[in-house]
């Protein structure tokens, strides 16, 4: 006896529904150190283009538009070396500008080193999902100005914690900063950590963090720096074991002196993200930790 048509239709409908649910849990991530929109393609540009870190120049917005074109293909973007609105950026908040150009409904700027009119060194978030909480953490260091931007999506044990950071240049400072970070992430099951960590996968610092948390790096050795001849993997996206990594890659998008790193993950069914249909808004911090963490 043949299967009734309505049973076939029901099965197809159920399979389609399950497929749609699985797709809705896929999230595309991008981490990018944009060097405030400065195009760098040779080592000598650090000297010859150094004035661009202080003064405005017309091509900066063109570079930001190219970055926005790339960012628009993703769901959550973590930005490092963004300017929060100073002389060099034409007093434009670059995170807000990128959110508008790329059509992100949620954005947030964390200024960690405020040099007044001359520079606003910041981390940035672009998101198609509304965070339930935004926390600014000031990371320890001999030279102040390093921070971590923490986003929590959802509530309870199945909330998703996402952290954007830019670590210090010295190993000792990085270890202290990762000590602070490990204390934060240990209380969460579902974690994504992204940013410019200024150290490689095989470094003592990354090994220290992975041994003390449930985080892992799906693929080692994805070289992102310098963008014109990548030899070092200092940009990372680390995830907890509860998240299924669908893909990860370094993108050939050489504007900054870093290349962006992209990842697609599939979230557990219990994790829920609230998307906005359209429009660009802003996210206000619920908690701001304006103190140095204890470190390791």
Image (cartoon, rainbow, N blue to C red):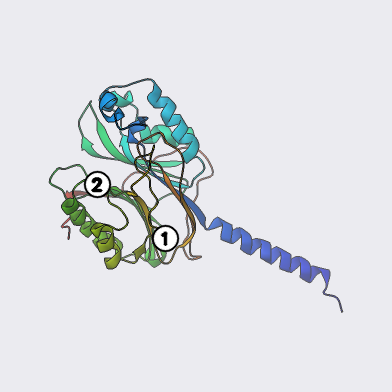
Residue 104 can be seen, yes or no = no
> Left or right of 174: which side holds 268?
right
The residue at which mark 1 appears reads as: 218
Residue 101 can be seen, yes or no = yes
The residue at which mark 2 appears reads as: 147
Of residue 151 and residue 185, the one placed in the foreground of this image is 185
Question: Secondary structure beneath disc 2?
Answer: strand
Tell me which residue sits at (54%, 44%) in the image: 277
| Residue depth check, mark 1 versus mark 2: number of the one nearer the observer | 1
Residue at the far left: name it. 142
Relative to 107, residue 24 above or below: below
Question: Secondary structure beneath disc 1?
Answer: loop
Tell me which residue sits at (45%, 63%) in the image: 243
Q: Which mark is residue 249?
A: none
Q: Position of residue 114 (x, y in %)?
A: 21, 34
Q: Position of residue 103 (x, y in %)?
A: 49, 37
Tell me which residue sits at (17%, 61%) in the image: 296
């Amino acid at each position: 006896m043949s299967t009734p048509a309505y049973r076939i239709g029901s099965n197809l409908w159920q399979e389609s529904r399950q497929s749609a649910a699985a797709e809705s849990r896929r999230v595309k991530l991008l981490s990018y150190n944009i060097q405030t929109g400065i195009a760098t393609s040779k080592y000598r540009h650090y000297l010859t283009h150094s004035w661009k870190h202080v003064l405005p120049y017309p091509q900066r917005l063109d570079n930001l538009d190219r970055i926005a074109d790339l960012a628009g293909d993703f769901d959550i973007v973590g930005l490092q070396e963004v300017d929060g609105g100073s002389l060099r950026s034409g007093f434009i908040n670059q995170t807000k500008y990128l959110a508008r150009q790329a059509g992100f409904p949620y954005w947030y700027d964390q200024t960690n080193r405020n040099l007044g009119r001359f520079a606003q060194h910041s981390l940035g978030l672009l998101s198609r999902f509304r965070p339930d909480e935004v926390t600014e953490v000031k990371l320890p260091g001999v030279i102040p100005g390093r921070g971590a931007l923490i986003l929590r999506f959802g509530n309870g044990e199945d909330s998703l914690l996402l952290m954007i950071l830019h670590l210090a240049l010295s190993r000792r400072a990085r270890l202290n900063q990762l000590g602070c970070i490990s204390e934060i992430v240990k209380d969460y099951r579902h974690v994504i950590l992204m940013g410019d960590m200024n150290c490689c996968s095989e470094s003592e610092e990354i090994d220290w963090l992975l041994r003390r948390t449930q985080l892992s790096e799906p693929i080692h050795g994805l070289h992102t720096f310098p963008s014109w001849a990548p030899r070092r993997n200092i940009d990372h996206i680390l995830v907890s074991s509860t998240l299924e990594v669908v893909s990860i890659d370094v993108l050939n998008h050489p504007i900054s002196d870093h290349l962006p790193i992209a990842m697609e993950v599939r979230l557990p069914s219990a994790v829920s993200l609230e998307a906005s249909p359209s429009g660009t808004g802003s996210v206000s911090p619920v908690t701001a930790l304006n103190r140095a963490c204890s470190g390791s």
